[in-house]
Image: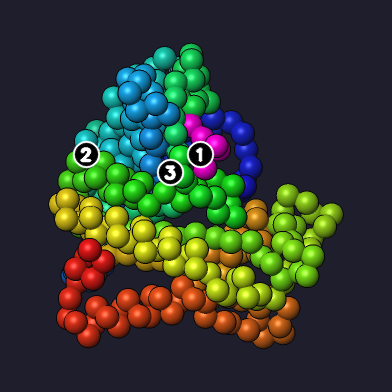
Amino acid sequence: GAAPGLGSTLQMYRCGHHLLVAHAHAVASFRRTAPAGAKISLNLNQDFPYPRNASDPDDRAAAERQLIFRLGWWADPVFGTGDYPKEMKEFFVEHGIDLRFTPEEQRLLKGSADYYAMQHYSSMVCTPAGKSTRENFGVQCTSEGTEARGWWPAASFWLKVHPEGIRAMLGWIQARYHPNELIITENGVDDEDNGSAAGPTPSCGALDDPSRPGQCGACTLANVRDQFRVEYYRGYLYNVALAVKDGVNVRGYFAWSLLDNFEWSDGFRCRFGLVCIDYTAPGKTRIPKSSAGWWRQLLARIDSARTTVVDALI
């Protein structure tokens, strides 16, 4: 669902390697020229992986390996040692992938962020995938079928709502990297565009069916009265507050998103906003949803009571 649409796993690791090196040099340049007190980081997205069977040690190891290969890939060089996790270096040797940082690159990478910037939306379940390959590094994870666990689905197929996952994700990051400051830069949930009288318009601006560009719809009552989104934020913020009580140094939170937006290859089909966009109106009328009202009330309560978000939610 993202450019340039290449399927080469080897190229993926090479691209990631050069991204990290570029990040290290960009941060070094920023710190030489930025005003005093300016901060910089990189956003790291990760859904929390649970073992498919919590009592199975192989499933537990698979979930941990998913975290190391999908998040540690980026976070270990920046917030840890300045180098890849040892599991990834072993994997590179096993599969003939020659990617190594020079001593100077390691020096630049280590500590090349002033705070931890975390994106989180969903959770998944993991189990071993048999023989490790370049494609799966020995782990198979999915969010499919998790409704049986009580995780309810959103419009995006990959997004399953499990508020406890954000507390678990924050705890893992704090335990491994000990950030002095962590900011949640994205967290939210989407519903379908329901502007058509016939129901959802799955091809509305989407790239999966270019022969049917679709017509994005108006804001329906279902879009605006988004109680499910209120429950999402209430549950996830509550678990963020619990993580703070656990000792995680959360210093900021950004909801995704303020407005309905163009969502990758899904186009305008998936609505993440606190404000609904009427795509049929010439001026693209903006209508605050119930979730926007809930946020307004929460922030007003915090401001009037001169209290913290944590105290307001627990």
Residue 176 tag number: 2
Q: Answer left or right for 129 relative to 77.
A: right
Q: Which residue is mark 3?
A: 123
Tell me, what colour scheme is on the image?
rainbow
Q: Which residue is mark 1?
A: 148
Q: Amino acid at mark 3?
A: Ser
Q: Where is residue 310 drawn, in percent x and y? A: 21, 65
Q: Which residues are magenta?
A: 141-147
Which secondary structure lies at badge 2?
helix
> Please, is residue 227 above or below residue 267 in the view?
below
Measure the alpha-carbon separation of dots 1 and 3: 14 Å
> Please, is residue 245 above or below residue 234 in the view?
above
Q: Residue at x 36, y 58 (%)?
A: 236
Q: Amino acid at mark 2?
A: Arg
Measure the alpha-carbon separation of dots 3 and 2: 19 Å
Q: Amino acid at mark 1?
A: Ala
